[in-house]
């Protein structure tokens, strides 16, 4: 009997260690905030999808599925949507989730201080019907609205108010910048910006647990070679991204797996459409050459996209002609051709625009946000110089990059865009609509591109139920953006993840890493 008790005691003592499945991962860009409404960027939203939840979410195949809402239905003849909320849900601090939290989160996320306010441009009002029913009214029929709010995360109104975080503050920050209180499968237990973020499973989560993790730690490593070394040594279990040049070598290593795909993100060049003059030119100080579509067209012909894909991306990316990839809903099959690499045509366009000798300018670029972003910008700088456009490259960490763009401190810039709705309407709303704070439009249209017809078509695209008619309108917008060279879309970014061989996970084309799908074997 004593021996049986002793054995049982030993097994009990060893059980926690045997069941402990700790997971570590590395990314190049640390989330700049823990506030789900402060910054509309993939590093922030992707990470916080593990902590906060919305009314709906995207599954492994990117389909929209219930989350804090169990179901939803249209109201009347396109008046909006009614959401039936999940009962018995708790926030990480134990507070109960109700419709009041949805109303509060709408008011917070659509506030002028919020970077997510454009998501709610179609919304005219939010009405609490009862504790577990909410009506979201729209100014016009909006058939894609439920899918458009998959990344809108719900906060606890009481927690935010108690901690003076009723509104986001992306500039100075507040309590929600470093602290979290969501309803998601994981809760943040330690946050040291730029160093580490620790998460642990939330025992009170309402959902079905698919992972077997006991602890997860995110460590940002900006240098890709350092991250790769950490993966190979076993110091981390997962890195994103894998350096393109190391993919073939890594595939031969039995201790690691390489997971490859194509992201929904289009990498493009943007321009200062509404600027009166260049900011960083040594020879053009009283004019803005990029206000002329011929100059923007010259840029499109001067950049050798096939060469970038072959040399820098090692054949792992695909060129693109639009603000969305062919995999997105609304992609225009009628406008698939992109400008050919043609240096002579680029020089002729510059001369026609009045710049036969070219000009100097400043090119802003992040160095830790997109795959090989600084290398791509260096290549573009060399290509543009060959036709007379002499760029001075200024590459910087993304935490400094976005403030520079919002302060108009650029003459040309690099941007990547992944449509959260997987629909062409999304970049039209964010990137191509005339910036309008009141209407919550154009919040990422840094250069102030404006076209009256595009502005006219957007609400029609949002409300049109007939797929054929809707596509015709998207085709027209696509043609306008291409003809005016509002941006220069270049390629769809590849997804290249690396894991230890004992890790199972799911790669989604939005490049969001979801912990609740991770298993340590």
Image (cartoon, helix red, strand yellow):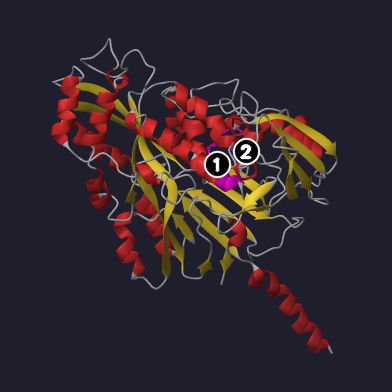
**In the rendered view, would you say 449 is above or below 285?**
below
Q: Residue furthest top?
A: 286
Residue at 33%, 30% (x, y): give it. 483
Prevailing secondary structure class for the magenta stretch in the rendered image: loop
Q: Position of residue 181 (x, y in %)?
A: 71, 43
Compare residues 475 and 436 and report the one nearer the observer.
475
Q: CA distance from mark 2 to mark 1?
A: 7 Å
The quadrant of the image that shows the C terminus is bottom right
Q: Which residue is mark 1?
A: 44
Q: Are marks 2 and 1 in contact (CB under 8 Å)?
A: yes
Give yes or no for residue 32 being in the magenta stretch: yes
Disc 2 or 1, which lies upstream in sequence? 2
Q: Which residue is mark 2?
A: 36
Q: Nearer the viewer, residue 222 or 73?
A: 73
SS for callout 1: helix
Res 443 seen here: no
Residue 386 coordinates in the image, percent (x, y): 15, 33
Magenta segment boundaries in residue numbering: 31-48
Vertical arrangement, residue 212 with respect to residue 392, above or below: below
Can you give x and y, in whole percent of width and height, for residue 392 in the image?
25, 27
């Amino acid at each position: 009997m004593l021996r049986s008790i002793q054995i049982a005691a030993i097994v009990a003592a060893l059980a926690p260690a045997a069941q402990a499945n700790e997971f570590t991962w590395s990314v190049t860009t640390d989330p700049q905030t823990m506030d789900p409404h402060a910054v509309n960027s993939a590093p922030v939203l992707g990470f916080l999808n593990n902590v906060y939840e919305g009314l709906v979410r995207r599954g492994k195949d990117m389909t929209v599925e219930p989350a804090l809402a169990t179901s939803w239905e249209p109201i009347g003849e396109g008046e909006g949507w009614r959401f039936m909320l999940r009962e018995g849900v708790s926030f990480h601090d134990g507070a109960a989730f109700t419709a009041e939290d949805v109303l509060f989160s709408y008011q917070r996320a659509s506030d002028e201080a919020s970077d997510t306010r454009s998501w709610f441009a179609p919304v005219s009002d939010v009405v609490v019907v009862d504790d577990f029913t909410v009506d979201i009214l729209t100014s016009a029929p909006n058939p894609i609205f439920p899918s458009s709010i998959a990344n809108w995360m719900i906060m606890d109104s009481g927690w935010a108010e108690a901690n003076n975080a009723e509104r986001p503050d992306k500039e100075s920050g507040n309590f929600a910048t470093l602290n979290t209180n969501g309803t998601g499968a994981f809760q943040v237990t330690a946050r040291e910006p730029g160093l580490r973020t620790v998460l642990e499973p939330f025992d009170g989560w309402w959902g079905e647990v698919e992972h077997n993790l006991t602890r997860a730690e995110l460590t940002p490593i900006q240098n890709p070679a350092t991250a790769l070394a950490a993966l190979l040594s076993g110091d981390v279990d997962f890195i994103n991204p894998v350096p393109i040049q190391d993919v073939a070598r890594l595939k031969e290593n039995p201790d690691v797996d390489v997971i490859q795909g194509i992201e929904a993100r289009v990498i493009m060049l943007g321009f200062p459409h509404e600027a009166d003059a260049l900011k960083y030119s040594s020879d053009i100080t009283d004019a803005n050459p990029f206000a002329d579509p011929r100059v923007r067209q010259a840029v499109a012909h001067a950049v050798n996209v096939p060469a970038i894909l072959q040399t820098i991306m090692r054949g792992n990316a695909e060129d693109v002609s639009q603000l969305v990839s062919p995999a997105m809903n609304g992609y225009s099959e009628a406008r698939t051709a992109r400008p050919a690499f043609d240096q002579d045509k680029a020089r002729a366009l510059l001369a026609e625009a009045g710049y036969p000798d070219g000009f100097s300018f400043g090119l802003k670029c992040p160095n830790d946000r997109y795959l090989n972003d600084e290398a791509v910008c260096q290549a573009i700088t060399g290509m543009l110089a060959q036709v007379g456009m002499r760029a001075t490259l200024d590459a910087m960490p993304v935490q400094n990059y976005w403030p520079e763009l919002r302060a108009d401190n650029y003459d040309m810039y690099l941007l990547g865009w992944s449509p959260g709705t997987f629909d062409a309407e999304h970049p039209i709303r964010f990137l191509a609509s005339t910036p309008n704070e009141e209407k919550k439009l154009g919040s990422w249209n840094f250069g102030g591109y404006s076209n009256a017809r595009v502005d006219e078509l957007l609400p029609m695209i949002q409300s049109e139920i007939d797929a054929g008619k809707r596509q015709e309108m998207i085709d027209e917008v696509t043609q306008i953006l291409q003809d005016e060279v509002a941006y220069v879309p270049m390629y769809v970014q590849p997804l290249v993840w690396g894991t230890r061989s004992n890790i199972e996970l799911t790669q989604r084309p939005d490049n969001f890493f979801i912990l609740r799908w991770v298993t340590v074997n």
